[in-house]
Image (cartoon, rainbow, N blue to C red):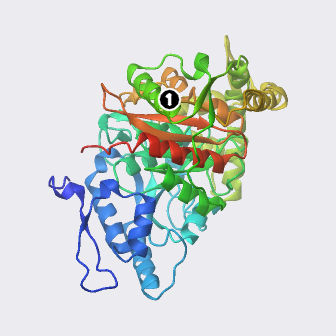
Amino acid sequence: MRLPAVATLLLVALATASCASTARHPVDLTEVGVVDAMRLIRAGRVSSVELTQAYLTRAHAHGDLNAFVTLDREGALTAARRADAELAAGRVRGPLHGVPLVVKDNIHVAGLPNTAGTPALRRFVPTTSAPVAQKLIDAGAVVLGKTNMHELAFGISGYNEGFFTASPIGTRNPYDRSRIAGGSSSGTGAAIAARLAPGGLGSDTGGSVRIPAALCGIAGLRPTIGRYSGDGVTPISHSRDTAGPMAPTVADVAVLDAAIAGGSVTPASLRGVKLGVYRAYFFADLDADTKAVTDAALEKLRQAGVAIVEVDMPQLKTLNDGASFPVALYEAYDDLKAYLERHRVGLSVEQVAAAIASKDVKATYDGLVVPRKLPAPNGVVDAAPIYQEAMQRARPALVAHFADTFRNYGIDALVGPTTPHVAVVQGPEASSLETFLRFIRNTDPGSNAGLPGLTIPAGLGPSTGLPVGLSLDGPRGSDERLLALGLAIEELLGRTPPPKR
């Protein structure tokens, strides 16, 4: 179903403010983010019900994006009505009062299925929300539904053969529906970019918040490991997993982060800021659009008084390789087993694996995760000793390598393109190992070191018109500083235009 051209803008009539004579004006949902929605609702210029209904209608009209697994129309409208009644009575739950949001389908929301994008969990309905989701609900958020994802979060393409609302298969990029939205938080990225919601939650193990955010022209934060609770999130790796907020702007992301972790941020002064550039790794093999947009962003930063410092991290690739797959693939079995038992799902890891629908994920579980193996030049080898080596040597050394780089060069953060390429064409080939490794290259090292990472919309490529993200990786615990820098950079670069369609 498609709405007429004018209706696709979903211009929401502003509700009458406290003065009955206040005129109504249209609000273009392509320009509404979390901060905008908060202000409109609190000012009485639009009701939560109006905004929620508009997003639900828009989501229905854009089913071809495959952005949702569950769209909770009844529950969302009930929560929105409650929010409006409370506001009318003078009660405000929190800063997100009445604001509609979406949640990735591996993060528990009480009463909604939590499939993690895999058929075996289709009927699993948690009775309590994950703390990270509950924090947003306690702050007043309305959950529109659960968003699609790469199956079990094991990929970056969002080509999920088990969950799609419309053919062709795969979550689609709103800027070009023939292309990927990134992953594994594919649906959250696509929904926000298409203005089916003003913000939401994803999860990030090696880039799964930042990759879809970058490819969809929005902002996303991977917080320092441990900043958010991981309870009630279907896991891959407890050493690497974290939920993360996604929204059109860094300002929106900062509001969501504050609701979850506390604190507040204001834009930093860019004068005197030092950002590190490691060209041999983070800037290698960029496509033309990514290079053009990134180079232009760095030049604007220089003109604003930022010192761009060339750094060398000679051990980065070797240490990251030693800490990446060995940790994720080994912990995936034990962590999923513990999760299934803790939440009384009634399934074993083997039963979940047997029902996996996506061929790439099925091969990973059957060949590596379940038998506890890791790939080797001549086949596979036992994972346990390599995992122990990763945790005892490679991972601590990677953490130290980043810390030494920040300290020795006196930099506030590392800066570079979030992904080396703009979004590729969606389809089975988008789930190839080659594509996976290409798109996680810049986000994976910081993930393995437990660092905070922020992606900022940097603009549209001059030839493809596809979004490019600019990434900041900061020292552990520097989340608020990173967001403050992001706010300032966002003001400097300007907002990335929304999809035309």
Q: Classify mark 1: residues with Cα within 10 Å, few (<14), some (14-19) or many (20+).
A: many
Residue type, mark 1 in image:
Leu
Residue 49 vertical position relative to residue 317 in the rendered view, above or below: below
Question: Which quadrant would the C terminus be assigned to in this image?
Answer: top left
Left or right: 137 with respect to 83? right
Quarter occupied by residue 290: top left
Nearest the eye: 165 or 68: 68
Taking the image as drawn, is residue 230 in sight? yes
Nearest the eye: 23 or 178: 23
Question: Which residue is disc 1 drawn over?
Answer: 298
Residue 40 vertical position relative to residue 69 in the rendered view, above or below: below
Q: Work out which residue is located at the far bottom of the displayed protein and give it.
A: 89
Q: Secondary structure at mark 1?
A: helix
Left or right: 213 with respect to 166? right
The picture places residue 432, in percent across and down from the top left corner, at: 48, 24
Left or right: 364 with respect to 97? right
Q: Work out which residue is located at the far top of the displayed protein and give it.
A: 378
The picture places residue 224, in percent across and down from the top left corner, at: 68, 46
Nearest the eye: 257 or 169: 257
Residue under the point 85% across and 30% down = 392
The picture places residue 170, in percent across and down from the top left corner, at: 38, 38
Residue under the point 52% across and 46% down = 488
